[in-house]
Image (spheres, helix red, strand yellow):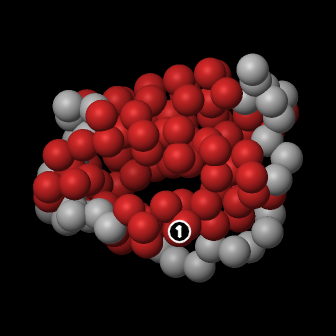
Amino acid sequence: MQKEIQSKEEIKQMVDSFYDKVNKDELLAPIFNDFAGVNWEKHLPIMYDFWSTILLGDMSYKGNPFLKHIPLPIDKKHFDRWLNLFLETINEHFTGNMAEEAKQRATNIAGVFQHKLASINQQ
């Protein structure tokens, strides 16, 4: 059943559902788990804060997410898969204005990160 994103509880469900897909994905799981060696116990709460800041305006996230992506061996196909999994997660679980905002923000983030990384890699 779909619901609206209204609180950190829904943000947590969104993030957990999304990263469950990422961890099962043949393209993205090796980047997160092998190359980056993500510590999920630490990473997930950071992502709760990141998306809570973006969608709920609670300002719980402090940091620069782009910097963490610079050393990763990722390109357009990774961003496309990341975005597809994110949009799929939202469409499966959520509805309403905040769900649409989450999809728009994720689309923008993927585009900006992809563009900036391509610029760095061309230097």
Expressed as whole percent of the image width and height from the top left, the position of residue 47 reads 54, 60
Compared to residue 95, the image places residue 105 above or below, namely: below
Taking the view exactly as shown, the residue that stands out farthest to the bottom is 62
In the displayed structure image, the side of residue 36 where residue 39 appears, left or right: right
Name the residue rendered at 68%, 50% in the picture. 11
Q: Quadrant of residue 79?
A: top left
Quadrant of the image containing the C terminus: bottom left
Quadrant of the image containing the N terminus: top right
Residue 122 appears in the figure? no
Which structural element holds mark 1?
A: helix
Expressed as whole percent of the image width and height from the top left, the position of residue 118 reads 25, 49
Expressed as whole percent of the image width and height from the top left, the position of residue 16 reads 53, 47
Name the residue rendered at 44%, 26% in the picture. 84
Name the residue rendered at 14%, 55% in the picture. 34
Q: Quadrant of residue 2?
A: top right
In the displayed structure image, the side of residue 75 where residue 49 appears, left or right: right
User: Mark 1 — residue?
Assistant: 46
Amino acid identity at mark 1: Ile
Density class for disc 1 (Cα within 10 Å; few <14, some 14-19, many ≥20) is: some
Compared to residue 68, the image places residue 34 above or below, namely: above
Name the residue rendered at 40%, 52% in the picture. 113
